[in-house]
Amino acid sequence: MDRFFEKIIKPILIKYEATHIVEIGVFLGGRTTIKLLEFCKMMNGKLTVIDPAPGFNTYAYEAVFSEELVVHKKHSLEVLSELQAADVFLIDGDHNWYTVYHELMAIEQMAIRSGKFPIVILHDTEWPYGRRDSYYFPETIPTQYRKLHAQKGVKAGSSELVETGGINETQFNAMNEYGEENGVLTAIEDFLKVTTFSLSFHRVYTNNGLGILVPSDEKVDTVMQYIMDTSGL
């Protein structure tokens, strides 16, 4: 997410005056989380972080940003139903169809309760996980949605996993690319088929891809198109 922050994410946060941001998946708690917290401090806002195993000292972050930060050390689908509303969601957690699709469905239910669909920004909408599932915790995915997978690497141009090398070889990756209910982009497309909200979907193709869901409105779409056109990404 950090590679998109200055040119896309931050302009969106400023334009829509976001005061409650939800970040799903923080990994090592890197530069994006810090930048979001600094933005929230400036805006008197709040950042809700959701990650079952954040790879950083959350207590240190909470000490520095005591007014801005709320941390949930749980899986996203355990927490989202408890949230009342948020302005912007950043989703960069478990990159598989089941998780992303149900995260979006949970956000829709939140939007129904609040009367407003938030802006949702999702990472890894292109290769390698746009059309391939990956599982940090395979046991948390219901059997019927869990693809055959292995701790093997992914290589561009190969639908099957490679025996040696490739990227992300320590992760649990689906054995094959493409097909139904497989990958982040597929989850977004399937959600758009069933959502009761009128949404527009914007895509950035670089840096493994970024997808942005916004309420479909002529003014909003114009702003989003301007941000995308001037980002240079």
Image: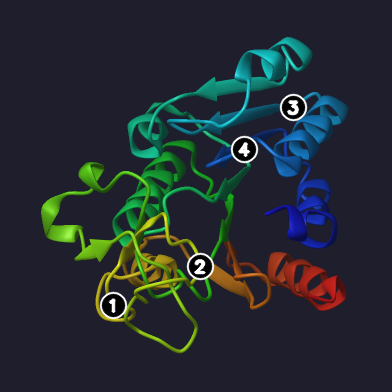
Mark 1 / mark 4, whichever is N-terminal: 4
**SS category of the residue bearing label 4:** loop
Classify 10 Å Cα crowding around label 2: few (below 14), some (14-19), many (20 and above).
Answer: some
Q: Which residue is mark 3?
A: 45
Mark 2 / mark 4, whichever is N-terminal: 4
| Quadrant hosting residue 148 | bottom left
Residue at 31 percent of width and 44 percent of height: 137
Q: Check whether the beta carbons of the residues at disc 3 and disc 4 lie within 8 A of each other.
A: no
Mark 3 vs mark 4, CA separation in Å: 22 Å
Q: Check whether the beta carbons of the residues at disc 2 and disc 3 lie within 8 A of each other.
A: no
Mark 2 / mark 3, whichever is N-terminal: 3
Question: Which of the pair 10/147 is nearer the observer?
Answer: 147
Q: Type of residue at label 4?
A: Leu
Mark 2 vs mark 3, CA separation in Å: 37 Å
Q: Which residue is mark 1?
A: 176
Q: Type of residue at label 1?
A: Asn
Q: Which numbered tag is attached to residue 167? A: 2
Please state if 197 lies on the left or on the right of 20 as rendered: left
Residue at 67 percent of width and 70 percent of height: 207
Q: Type of residue at label 3?
A: Gly
